[in-house]
Amino acid sequence: MVFCTCPPDAADTLAHGVVERRLAACVNVLPKIRSVYRWEGAVTADEESLLLIKTTAATVATLREWLCAEHPYDVPEVIAVPVTAGAPDYLAWVANETR
């Protein structure tokens, strides 16, 4: 599972891009979150979208490279966390769709 925040107007493009390239089987777009963070020495807050990207460990490096190249932020958030369990049929589907 990879988490990636982005501007709301970029969310659909990024989500479609990773699925079309088989870098992910599915992307959930949480359309409206509020992020508070420090950037260039100042605390700021922005409205963003959150992408929950379903992929495999074998695909994470290529997915990260593509996201960093296509993302509108200078430093995009791309955080991968391991999935330690899940419905076997679903996990098989994710593996099949990311080949």
Image (tube, rainbow, N blue to C red):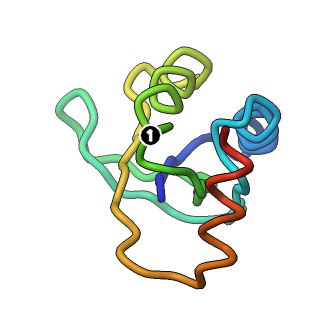
The structure residue drawn at horizontal position 74% and vertical position 49%, both measured from the top left corner, is 97
Q: Residue 68: horizontal and vertical position, in percent?
A: 48, 22
Q: Quadrant of residue 88?
A: bottom right
Q: Is residue 68 above or below residue 34?
A: above
Q: Nearer the viewer, residue 97 or 44?
A: 97
The structure residue drawn at horizontal position 47% and vertical position 21%, both measured from the top left corner, is 65
The C terminus sits in image quarter: top right
For label 1, count other residues whose C-alpha is less than 10 Å away and answer few (under 14), some (14-19) or many (20+): few
Q: Is residue 78 above or below residue 73?
A: below
Q: Nearer the viewer, residue 96 or 64?
A: 96
Most extreme residue toward the top, as rendered? 69
> Which residue position is annotated with label 1?
58
Horizontal placement of 83 versus 55: left or right? left
Q: Residue 30: horizontal and vertical position, in percent?
A: 67, 65
Q: Quadrant of residue 27?
A: bottom right
Q: Residue 64: horizontal and vertical position, in percent?
A: 46, 30
Q: Quadrant of residue 22?
A: top right
Q: Nearer the viewer, residue 58 or 77?
A: 58
Q: Nearer the viewer, residue 79 or 77?
A: 79
What is the tally of numbered marks visible in this picture?
Answer: 1
Q: Residue 52: horizontal and vertical position, in percent?
A: 58, 60
Tag 1, which secondary structure?
helix
Most extreme residue toward the bottom, as rendered? 87
Identity, as a three-letter code, of the amino acid under mark 1: Ala
Q: Is residue 81 above or below residue 58?
A: below
